[in-house]
Image (cartoon, coloured by chain):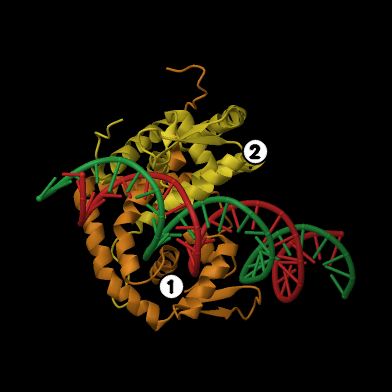
Chain colours: A orange, B yellow, C red, D green
Amino acid sequence: MHPKSGKLRHRNLPLLLLQARELVIAHFRPILNEHGITEQQWRIVRALIDTGPMEQREIGELCRISSPSLAGVLSRMQQVGYIKRKRLERDQRRLMVSLTPRSRALSARMAPQIEATYRRIESVIGAEFSTRFYGALDELIGALTPDRDYNHSS
Amino acid sequence: MHPKSGKLRHRNLPLLLLQARELVIAHFRPILNEHGITEQQWRIVRALIDTGPMEQREIGELCRISSPSLAGVLSRMQQVGYIKRKRLERDQRRLMVSLTPRSRALSARMAPQIEATYRRIESVIGAEFSTRFYGALDELIGALTPDRDYNHSS
DNA sequence: GCAATATTACTAATATATTAGTGAATAGTG
DNA sequence: CACTATTCACTAATATATTAGTAATATTGC
């Protein structure tokens, strides 16, 4: 079309992923607001519910929150009583993070609305497409995730 | 497994999309840093290159940047001479945003590295999967995008 | 026409992201 | 054991995100 316009050949993959995520999370945002929890805070609560207590470092990797951001987010979450932190005995640098009854109760209150929203999304995009899409995401993430040290002496 | 643990039934779709995006953008971040432009600023530059001049409101929708964020981002971009803004004659509220020679030159310098990175990513995930994935993303975005007013009296 | 409403860009306040760098603790090496 | 490199959480500075609200303009309904 415009040979001199300097357009890039490839489509904007990061933008497409961002748009997809924004469209999805838009369905959940009202729920988070209603319960007075931020997106990142809920991401962490949900990760801890799914996985159990985790080290701060592991939370950062799983939830894709950088170490400096995490320092602030977890600090605020501790202030409002959503988490508790405890240093590891054998390694005084590391911190183990776990949920409190308060955040568990919050999650329990939110769960029905979250589940209903997922069902609503699936009814729009179709169950079959939904399954395929999760598979494709897993494949992409698997292919792009750098091989890591899986013998971490836990 | 843990009937009383309060786990949610569905997988965390927003997190999966975030992880995918982070893994992809990680390949581009070094390029952006090398050229001293932020992620959002590049997102806007690239959108303007692909689409041509746009109103601030349109940029916000396309790039998924909220109006308050955009005010700051565009202000900084104007400071460093990446964009210029002009009020519409027929509507004094709206602003038309366009690139400058400086940002076009920057984009031209970055393009080869960007393209090479896309080729590298495609070589990892496979061209065939890549095509299918773009299609799936388009389908998801299309299904979740609310119908909008397409007769905007331009 | 005119009053009610909607749109657009913006400010303020707070939360989070990013980059660089720091100090304490640990792991690895010779 | 001593030395070095790495890891982990953190601070500082700046950029961006989110929510609520505002002023100026446009549009709509009656």
Q: Residue D12, position in %: x, y?
A: 69, 65
Left/right of residue A113 with respect to residue B134 in the rendered view: left
Q: In the visual, does A107 lie left or right of A7?
A: left
Mark 1 — on which chain does it sit? A
Mark 2, chain letter?
Answer: B
Residue at x 44%, y 68% (from the top left corner): A41
Q: Secondary structure at mark 1?
A: loop
Q: Residue at x 37, y 71 (%)?
A: A36
Quarter of the figure with the N terminus of chain B: bottom left
Q: Amino acid at mark 1?
A: Gly
According to the picture, the residue beneath numbered tag 2 turns out to be: B35
What amino acid type should be assigned to the residue bearing mark 2?
His
Q: Position of residue B106 (x, y in %)?
A: 61, 31
Q: Position of residue B60 (x, y in %)?
A: 41, 44
Disc assigned to residue A52: 1
| Residue A68 or residue B55, whichever sits in front | B55
Count of labels shown? 2
